[in-house]
Image (spheres, rainbow, N blue to C red):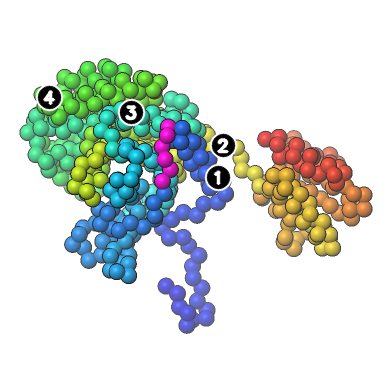
Amino acid sequence: MTDDNNPTFRPEARAPKGFADRRAADIAAQKAIIEAVSAVYDRYGFEALDTGGFEYADALGKFLPDAERPNAGVFALQDDDEQWMALRYDLTAPLARFAAENWQTLPKPFRRYAVGTVWRNEKPGPGRFREFVQCDADTVGSARPEADAEIIAMAVEGLEAAGLPRGQAVIKINNRKLLNGLLTTVGADAGQKLGVLRAVDKLDRLGPDGVRLLLGAGRKDESGAFTPGAGLSAKAAEQVLAFTAGGGGSRSEVLDRLSGVIGASAEGEEGLLELSKIAAALSSLDVGEDRAVIEPSVVRGLEYYTGAVFEAELTLDILDEAGKPARFGSIGGGGRYDDLVARFTGEVTPATGFSFGVSRLAAALAAAGRTGPERRGPVVVIVFDEAAMPEYFAVSAELRAAGIAAEVYLGSSGMKAQMKYADRRASPAAVIIGGDELAAGTVTIKDLDLGRELAAGVSSNEQWQAARPGQQTVARSELVAAVRKIVGRV
């Protein structure tokens, strides 16, 4: 809190936990991802949509209705009319609200993608932020499994367009109806089914033995904390584990394998048929086995998924901070959610979509060694003489008019400090116009990119001064052409 009555009070300079500051390089990486993925979504005929940052809290469904302040998981405030509003938790709930509100005038199915900031009032941690940018693509109004396949194909192409090499990310696909059908066969009730979903979703982290405990009576972790289990019998738990272990091999092989372990249930058969149609459509869309597989262990943790579910996972090996092999894990996911719009209309409206966090994808690209070109700053015009400031600004304006980023140094330091400033800005070049240049109608251009490249091969400062690497003097009329050669070299 501030203390306006205390003239010596100085607030501590600190960012709130879970809210990150981002400089130019991070912003440029994020922008490149968004532009590349958006271009793919545009080609698939999806319409861009932007909804407001706030939604009425009851539309998000992320709080207890009887809570005095609906702020569990979301950042909420009360409007002038005493209605609770909350910053959007994701981009799916706003889409459901938008579709319900405008359904009569929308083309059906409604295909949209959205990129925007979301906020989550959760405990922050390493790689876990309270504010981040999400990118979603959804089809609302089609129950066809081919709509799921199209979303998967588009997700594959989008991730590759963003910079992930083919084969370094794979979409894993399942259908909730398969597991639901199996659980119905073994006699599990509704409460147990939810517990099974939550247990199976931890398979990658806990392994089969840990999940087996959560499917049964429960599990105590290393700290001694006990998590109640789903309460399945030992036989039923083994049937679930057998189902989750049914992956591996081609999509057709997995489908054949699953047909023998889901049990005799109409819902399970329906899920198997939907998966087979998704597999056929993916083949037609040229999405091979190296880009999308059927994996029965994928269930997704959110309760609103009603059918197909899919998860994008980075497959390459990475090293953690200690230099040990580590698994990056999921970089996005989605599935079919046929009940969300019904929260507003009371009518089931089929929908399917895929979502990823832009910052997480940027981290995945970095892990894959795809950081993109090194950031470059503007050309810096060095200031020698205050009286020549009009000429310096004329030079910068001429460069900008030619499409070259440029700035005049506006500090108060000398030549050495100005060159250091240009280096810190990652400037490709510095333009030097002293008295001699002004009198001769010339400019001196220092190629800073070349200078950095050659610096490693120079053994002494004297040699460096004598060589004057990358420095040239040209006629004033040749300024733009000379600088363009330097800037365009990368």
Circles 3 and 4, Cβ within 8 Å, touching? The answer is no
Q: Position of residue 289 (x, y in %)?
A: 36, 20
User: Main structural element of the magenta stretch: helix, strand or loop?
Assistant: loop
Query: As rendered, which of 169 and 328 lies closer to the eye?
Result: 169
Q: Residues within 10 Å of mark 2 (few under 14, many from 20)?
A: few
Query: As rendered, which of 240 and 466 lies closer to the eye?
Result: 240
Residue at numbered disc 2 = 372
Front of the two marks 1 and 2: 1
Circles 1 and 2, Cβ within 8 Å, touching? The answer is yes
Answer with mark 4 or mark 1, whichever residue precedes in sequence: 1
Magenta stretch encompasses residue 391: no
Task: From this view, report whether residue 311 is shown above or below residue 23.
Answer: above
Q: Residues within 10 Å of mark 4 (few under 14, many from 20)?
A: some
Residue at numbered disc 3 = 149
Residue at numbered disc 4 = 263
Span shown in magenta: 44-49
- Could you tell me which secondary element the residue under label 3 belongs to? helix
What amino acid is found at the position of numbered circle 4 in the picture?
A: Gly
Front of the two marks 1 and 3: 3
Marks 4 and 1, how far apart at CA? 51 Å
Q: Quadrant of residue 182?
A: top left
Q: Quadrant of residue 84?
A: bottom left
